[in-house]
Image (cartoon, rainbow, N blue to C red):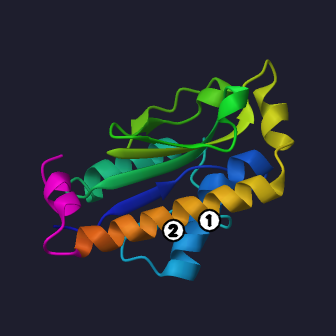
């Protein structure tokens, strides 16, 4: 099985949208995860270069399991929750940008309540919330990647069939 890919979407310029880049940096710097990790605070995957990365993944990593991470807005009761999808994710929805689907597994961190001004909501997210959520997501991804590398892994067998 080829190495998994983690694509972390977001921008370092907006606190609420920095969840993905913070996860990428933690995976690379704290966990040394054995996967291809794209995105980060210094080299973000964002609306400007998203389609280029999507095409790159389709061309260079077509045999790999792709885990996509992004921040999102949602219901007030969901703020602070992490949501998982076995169908990847669609980036850009909070700002009415349809950037297209990406990933086999999607991980969304609900960082703010959906409103008529989602950009304003993302700009006013407490840094501590994003920091805490990114730490949880990075730890879970590191565990998943470790499990995928285990020869007897149920996750590995399931990923081979995606």
Q: Which residue is drawn at 36% across and 64% down?
A: 144
Instruction: Mark 1: give few (<14), some (14-19) or many (20+) Cα within 10 Å.
Output: some
Q: Is residue 7 left or right of residue 148?
A: right
Position of the N terminus, as image quadrant, is bottom left
Decide: marks 2, 1 in contact (CB < 8 A)? yes
Could you say which disc has been placed on residue 9 in the image? none
What SS does tag 1 mark? Answer: helix
Above or below, 89 against 155 in this view is above
Q: Is residue 121 above or below residue 5?
A: above
x%, y% of residue 146? 33, 74
Instruction: Identify the residue shown where x is 68% and y is 64%.
Output: 41
Give left or right: position of 145 versus 152.
Answer: right
- Magenta highlight on residue 157: yes
Label 2 sits on a secondary structure element that is helix
Q: Image quarter for residue 24?
A: bottom right
Residue positioned most to the front: 77
Q: Left or right: where does residue 2 sit relative to residue 161?
A: right
Indicate the position of residue 25 as horizontal and vertical percent values.
60, 70
Q: Inspect this view and state whether residue 150 appears.
A: yes
- Find residue 90 and report its horizontal and vertical position in percent: 47, 33
| Residue 139 numbered mark, or none | 2
Q: Give the magenta part as a residue range.
A: 150-162
Q: Find the distance from the CA under tag 2 to the CA under tag 1.
A: 6 Å
Q: Which residue is drawn at 53% across and 65% down?
A: 138
Judge by depth and name the residue closer to the eye, 44 or 56. Answer: 44
From the image, tell me which residue sits under label 1.
135
């Amino acid at each position: 099985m080829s190495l998994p890919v983690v694509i972390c979407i977001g921008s370092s310029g907006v606190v609420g949208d920095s969840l993905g880049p913070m996860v990428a940096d933690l995976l690379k710097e704290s966990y040394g995860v054995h996967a291809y990790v794209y995105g980060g605070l210094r080299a973000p995957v964002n609306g400007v270069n998203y389609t280029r990365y999507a095409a790159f993944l389709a061309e260079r990593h077509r045999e790999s399991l792709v885990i996509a991470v992004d921040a999102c807005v949602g219901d007030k009761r969901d703020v602070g929750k992490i949501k998982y999808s076995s169908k990847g994710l669609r980036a850009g929805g909070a700002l009415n940008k349809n950037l297209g689907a990406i990933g086999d597994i999607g991980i969304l961190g609900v960082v703010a309540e959906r409103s008529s001004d989602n950009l304003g909501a993302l700009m006013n997210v407490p840094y501590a919330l994003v920091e805490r959520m990114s730490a949880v997501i990075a730890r879970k991804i590191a565990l998943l990647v470790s499990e995928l590398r285990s020869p007897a892994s149920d996750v590995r067998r399931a990923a081979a069939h995606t």
